[in-house]
Image (spheres, rainbow, N blue to C red):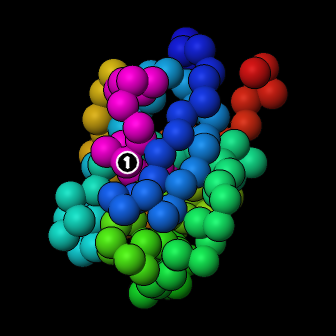
Amino acid sequence: MESEMTVHDGGCHCKNVRWRVQAPTKVVAWSCNCSICSMRGNTNFVVPSERFELLGNSEQFLTTYSFGSHTAKHTFCKVCGITSFYYPRSNPDGVAIIYGCVDPGTLTYDEVKYFDGQNWENSYNQLNIASQSKVDSGN
């Protein structure tokens, strides 16, 4: 059962990048061991892209890094260097929100699932991560 939907605000360390996302109050967080995620210590949750909104003039402070298949778009702040969200390869129709970049008080996670990014295709085929960026028509 999905928990109640709410609005979460968040952003980067220097607060030049700010965003708002509609997501459950309790989420499944994902941890990945691919080359970039393991270096960043990435723990995220995924939402459909239509539930994500950049606020104010945040776009001018963002830059993007991509590698490998160039499907994932790793956004980060040009000022402080923090990746507070990105567009994941597993969910190109969604947005991965970095758990630690959500403003405190509105979000908890029940479970952390592990995505074996070093064996990406196998992990993608075994897990149902692609469903995380689909809008449930029942909501």
Residue occupying the far right of the picture: 137
Give percent across and percent down for residue 92: 62, 64
Number of labels in the image equals: 1
Q: Give the range drawn in magenta.
A: 96-109
Q: Which residue lies at the image location 21% right of the left edge and 58% below the top edge?
A: 41
Does residue 94 appear anywhere in the picture? no
Say if the magenta span includes residue 102: yes
> Is residue 28 placed above or below 44 in the rendered structure?
above
Query: Observer-nearest residue: 32 or 124?
Result: 32
Horizontal placement of 76 versus 80: left or right?
right
**Residue behind mark 1:** 101
Query: Observer-nearest residue: 36 or 23?
Result: 23
Q: What element carries label 1?
A: helix
Q: Which residue lies at the image location 60% right of the left edge and 23% below the top edge?
A: 6
Q: Which residue lies at the image location 52% right of the left edge and 75% below the top edge?
A: 61
Does residue 109 appear anywhere in the picture? yes
Horizontal placement of 47 versus 118: left or right?
right
Q: Which residue type does callout 1 highlight?
A: Cys
Give percent across and percent down for residue 134: 69, 42
| Quarter of the image with the N terminus in it | top right
Give percent across and percent down for residue 8: 54, 34
Say if the magenta span includes residue 83: no
Instruction: Using a 10 Å C-alpha cutoff, classify the residue at mark 1 as few (fewer than 14 neighbours), some (14 to 19) or many (20 or more).
Output: some
Query: Observer-nearest residue: 121 or 136?
Result: 136
Give percent across and percent down for residue 85: 47, 58
